[in-house]
Amino acid sequence: MTTRRVRVGVIGTGALGFHHARLYRKLPDAQLVGIYDHHPGRGDQVGRELDTVAFPTLEALLERVEAVSVVVPTRAHAEVGLAVLSRGISALIEKPLADTLESAERLVRAADASGATLQVGHVERFNRAVRGAAPYLESPRFLQCERLAPFQPRGTDVAVILDLMIHDLDLVLELVHADVTEVRATGAPLLTAHVDIANARVEFANGAVALVTASRVTPKRTRTLRIFQPTGYFSLDLAQGTGHFYELKAGWQAMGARHLEEIVHHVKLSAPEAEPLALELESFLRAVRGEGDVVVSGAAGLQALTLAYRVADAIQASPLSAARP
């Protein structure tokens, strides 16, 4: 049985948008109709590189497609996303869903009203380390996330909370599955007008706690996630897509062990090798065809954005910092 190919386009062809278009060209379930970029020169250049059509206007592209990736600056997500969803065209909107909660809510309502599929680009859900850990996850109680990166101008139109930390806030919400009860945070702007480094403590109704750190002014790039749960401990390297699970052995309390290695079973986590963005796009195409659930729904994207703004508000209230995203 042949799977119907979805007619797709890409709006915004910067560094990330280029890869959306590149992968759509390769995916058997997609027919890349073309691209649109606000800067015609960039659109023409990418069109030539990828041998696809660079449409002169957004409207011209939308007349030809049934689904798109929206990969424009965050401040333009609402304007572009509403233009897409109001036509009943499905959209994968890169994270964060929008730059304000009001705009994010409008996007969710527009998708509901038109019946279009809305997915949010929280690509870490598809990270190989996260996929490898999934079968062993059971009621996480304590989580530590570190996402550190060198400075680069891209993304500095918003705070590091919306640029980087929101990846981990989304993961934490997905892993814990409980209401947030308290958020405490500190942060500071160092190289931009927005917060460039931030640390948050998030407490949940079920007793779980997450410590989340993000920086875009760190010399060395790091993306790690550590998870503690009643059955053991996870150490995930999200940058490498690798991880380990140290699972407590049954009856370990009675073993009289002197070393940790005696009471845990070491599991080297594994999952099929795949480019996370490609997996994300494939999941989006399945949802558009009605063959699978949306992995990161508009509601989930709104929930992550809401938590991000709670972190921002906590930073604003902290005596150690006074800046907003």
Image (cartoon, rainbow, N blue to C red):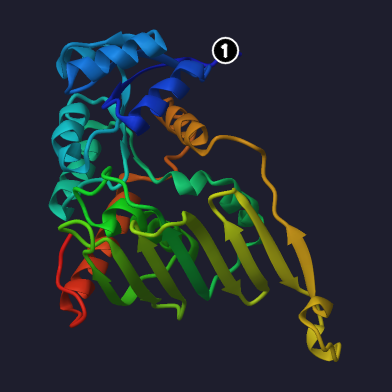
Residue sitting at the far front: 219
Residues 71 and 198: in front is: 198
SS at mark 1? loop
The reply to whether residue 239 is in sight is: yes
Q: Position of residue 291 (x, y in %)?
A: 49, 30
Q: Residue at x 13, y 35 (%)?
A: 79
Place of residue 133 in the rendered image (x, y in percent of width and height, measured from the top left):
63, 56
- Indicate whether 79 appears above or below 46: below
- Residue 291 visible in the current orientation: no
**Tally of marks:** 1
On the image, numbered disc 1 is attached to which residue? 2
Residue at horizontal 21 percent and vertical 46 percent from the top: 98
| Residue 324 horizontal/vertical position (percent) | 15, 63
| Neighbour tally class for label 1: few under 14, some 14-19, many 20 plus, Cα within 10 Å | few
Q: Quadrant of the C terminus?
A: bottom left
Looking at the rendered structure, the kind of residue marked 1 is: Thr
